Image (cartoon, coloured by chain):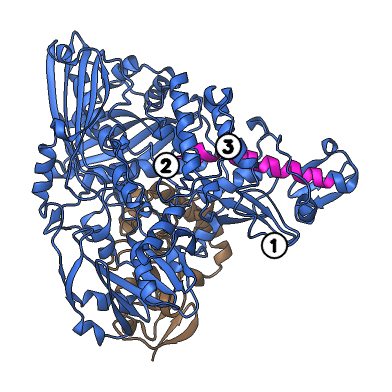
Chain colours: A brown, B blue
Amino acid sequence: MIELTVNGIKRQVDVVPEMPLLWVLRDELGITSAKYGCGVAQCGACTVHIDGKAVRSCQSHIGEVAGKSVITLEGLDNKEHHPVLQAWIEHQVPQCGYCQTGQIMQAISLLRKIPKPTDEQINQVMSGNLCRCGTYPRIRAAIHAAAAKKMAEK
Amino acid sequence: MGHMQTLSRRAFVFGSAAMAGGIAFGAYASAEAATSASDNPLAAGLGPNSVTFNPWVEISPDKITLIAQHADIGQGVGSVQPIMIAEEMDLDPGQFEIRFAEPSPAYFNTGFADEFAPFVAADQSPAAEEARAATLEWLRKSGLQMTGGSSTIPDTYQKLRLAGAVARETLKAAAAKRSGVAAADLRTQSGHVILPNGTKIAYVALAAEASKIPPVLDAQPRDPSKWRMLGKPMMRLDVRSKVMGELKFGIDQKAEGMLYASVKLNPSKGQPLKSYDAGKARSMPGVRKILEINNGVAVIATNSWYAMKAVDAIACEWAPSAYPAEQADHWKVLESSFKPEFLGKEWKKIGDIEAGLKTGKLVEAEYRAPYVAHQPLEPLNGIGLVTDNGMEIWVGHQSPRFVQWVAATAIGLKPEQITFHNQWTGGSFGHRLEYENVRVLAEIANQMKGTPIKLVFSREEDFLQDIPRQIAIARHRGSVDKSKIVAADLQLASTTPLKGLLERSGTPSKDPDGQLAAGLWNVYYDIPNFRATSYEAQGLSPSTTWRSVGASTSGFFTESFVDELIHAAGLDPMTARIAMCTVPHYRKVLETVAEMSDWKGPLGNGRGRGVAFVESFGTPTAEVVEVTATDRGIRIDKVWVAADVGKVVDPLNFESQVQGGVVWGLGHAINCELTYAKGAVQQTNYNHHEAMRIYQCPVIEVRGLENDPKVRGIGEPPVPPAAPALANAIFAATGKRIREMPFNKFIDFV
């Protein structure tokens, strides 16, 4: 049995330690906001936060996650009023939506490090998150809007 | 349409409305379907005290359900379809549920009539409209239920508003009967019929009574000036649940007692398995079973990852490919396909082409477009359960009735024994018109009778099995004389995407592939000597429809070549196109994009602009791309797009679709190709087939025009002009003419 904390709740799973966190979340724990897209850290659809940092859950072996705190989109604080989620809704970023949970988790991490990013900084940090529908113009706009919201809250 | 049920042979009026063209044609097409009860698939499943007026509206005592007939593949139709009904029914978002349509001929796609009839979109002559009416009748009889060809809005714009109007007026009639107040004195608002004294009766409370009266068939949709939601930026109904991570895609679904499957299939598409060694896989964690299927192996395990790891450990010996094993030989076959025996069709011939080519200066150019992959971010998947009664299948797909046929054929059942549940999908771009996952899921579930099986393709397997976009070569010749284009002889050799898809759908066609005409013959420039000919290459990789299909390659070839001719004639690419454009409202599209981009000729200083104009799926679309040649390569700075769809029903989503289409077109033109080696594609993940990431994404400015007499789609038309506009911009900036995709083989990009 491997024990980990997901969205503040202690969970136990009986799997091999090499199993990626992504598949533990999806198939063992029924947490589906983290998506399988590529399995090799090329698309970012599986992005979650471990101990506050954005990571690709397809590359995180569950054995190494044991004892750490995992936050998926479902477990974000203040989810209903989260400035990034609000901005994503107001700007209607999603088309198919499959990559968007990963985009959002990456964007939240970006704004923690750089509260008011430039387009260049957004491009740099968000380039690991692929969107096949081409929502990039709206992703940029939503990140700027979320940054402005966060500033206003301070 | 061999296996498809023929619709009821109810007589229909082949009346003058059909010949009138435009929206009247659409209304005619759908009025009968929208108000017909006899073929309504909702009738069979109706609960007590419930009512259905047509195949799109169902009201029970506790809820209102609106049916989305077209599959949502990210393009937003899971939202706009119900909103078109809700607009007419005076329902607000939140007052109804949405359900994807079941397989039924009632959901045949009227929107394909224009694309399938052998006339270019701008031709709205009586002869063209007559052919479209005949095509529509064929569609009705065949019950072709398919999402694709940018047809959702053309198909549903009239019929869903009519369906909503019939529902509204029938509910009013039921309320009139109950209250004794004349229907004309009643109004509707927010899911209620409102009496003159202010009393409100909820629609759900009228369901039982409405079921006992005949539907009000002469109801009319409202004039667009009365719209509350349509025509204005609106909140897509799926946005919130997608942002909150709550929406379940097909891959997120679960069934009680389910096991997980992953597959390894012969990467030489369509060829069988010769032998395999699963010795290592059998003892791997979580493995329950190893299965041999038609063209490969499957592992059944306790989760998807165990299944993927184990299937990866199986050594397979494959039968060799039926097409050339090496990519170079694919090109050779194409090169030798410009011969009479491979003629698809001479689509158009105007003037004297040979004499024209001898006049003035001759321009010749060869262009190439490679195979490319679809690769939506949600990999192919599905849940299947086979029992003694048949099969249930949960999969996101664009052709529900073909799914039934493919699954049934794979395991010896009848199509009606397949119960299909459509799913929200994480993109498609044409991928979910094919059946790789459907067929193998049926085979696996059939071997695991009684246990629900969830199949997920690994990304690598998805790439290997992805039936690619057509590969093509164009050999174009033309001439210019006295600052005019005198002749253009456009010749194309290509694999056949639509023919391939139809064959795999069980409805083979002997006709020339009409998608090879797209972007080739619908050229709206005043060129006195013109010919467009397609050749169909034989024996190459299967290919299929990929966002914008034939126009994705021919749009690039034609609009690059037109640009070369214009430059040879010493003209400005924008003003020459505007001057040559023969269709007034298409010319307006070009004029609009010129105005948006403030086009004033060459920019200089390493900067360049290119323009391209392509009509695909009836939607004329013009794009201007601006680039800068930097020390590190080409940077794409900005794109302007104008497109005329007759009516912009959702301006915000319209902009999203255009921006997405431009990103799709540019991204793949820059850096994507699939190449075969030993019969298998060499690109098996996104690092080999990257398309566009955010750092390369330009600013994209969009304008929708409403001059076309018909209502058109926007999912695909922004794609074809993107690649040629970029190539033309690179030429303007650097003097380098790129005639082959992907462009990064010839020039670097920032």
Which label's residue is closer to the chain start, 3 or 1?
A: 3
User: Is B562 in the magenta?
Assistant: no
Q: Which residue is disc 3 drawn over? A: B30
Residue A54 visible in image:
no
Q: Amino acid at mark 3?
A: Ser
Residue B676 spot, x, y in % from top left: 15, 54
Instruction: Name the secondary structure under disc 1.
Output: loop
Same chain shared by disc 1 and disc 2? yes
Q: Which residue is disc 2 drawn over? A: B715
What range of the chain is rendered magenta? B150-175
Q: Quadrant of residue A125?
A: bottom left
User: Is B159 in the magenta?
Assistant: yes
Which label's residue is closer to the chain start, 1 or 2?
A: 1
**Crowdedness of circle 3 by 10 Å Cα count: few (<14), some, many (20+)?**
many
Q: Amino acid at mark 1?
A: Gly
Q: Quadrant of residue B319?
A: bottom left
